[in-house]
Amino acid sequence: MYDKFMIHSNGADNPNASFWSNKHGWTNLVCASHFHYWETETFRLPITPGNDARWIPVAHAYDPTLNEINEGDELPLTDFALYHAIEIQGVSVVA
């Protein structure tokens, strides 16, 4: 789940183009470039008007609610290299 990352910015010039593509520049989620975790250490983040470009896991880009329920987003990017997998268990509520 956390083996690929994307670059996201709220400060991109176009609100419908808030993901980075090496080929197209700022674009939509579907056309965005995916990066391995080790590339996050050497790839220079693109400049945005708000200087808010940041790395996010691809899974979070497709499902932003993961930011709220998963503690994995608080790990430094370098720590993701220490793991081969992250297990996520479902929870069901019976009323």
Image (tube, helix red, strand yellow):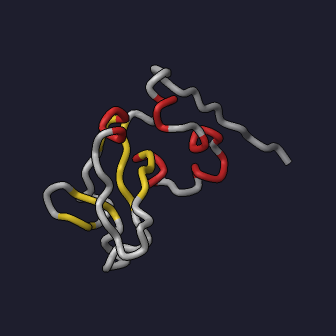
Where residue 64 appears, as percent x and y from the top left, is 53, 57
Residue, far left: 23
Say which residue appears at 44% left-offset and 26% top-offset: 81
Q: Is residue 77 left or right of residue 28?
A: right
Quarter residue 74 falls in:
top right
Q: Residue furthest right?
A: 95
Residue 70 is left or right of residue 44, and the answer is right
* Along the line of sight, the residue nearer the viewer: 38 or 24: 38
Residue placed most toward the observer, 83 or 79: 79
Q: Is residue 86 left or right of residue 1?
A: right
Residue plotted at (37% across, 77% down): 15
What is the count of numbered marks?
Answer: 0
- Place residue 1 in its image quadrant: top left
Question: Residue 16: which quarter of the image?
Answer: bottom left
Q: Where in the figure is residue 28, as x and y percent of width and height?
A: 29, 66
Q: Position of residue 92 (x, y in %)?
A: 73, 40
> Above or below — where is 86 with respect to 62?
above
Residue occupying the far bottom of the picture: 14
Q: Is residue 64 left or right of residue 71?
A: left
Point 31% across, 71% down: residue: 17
52 vs 14: above or below = above
Whether residue 69 is situated above or below residue 77 in the rendered picture? below
Coordinates of residue 21 in the picture (x, y in percent): 22, 57
Q: Residue at x 32, y 79 (%)?
A: 14
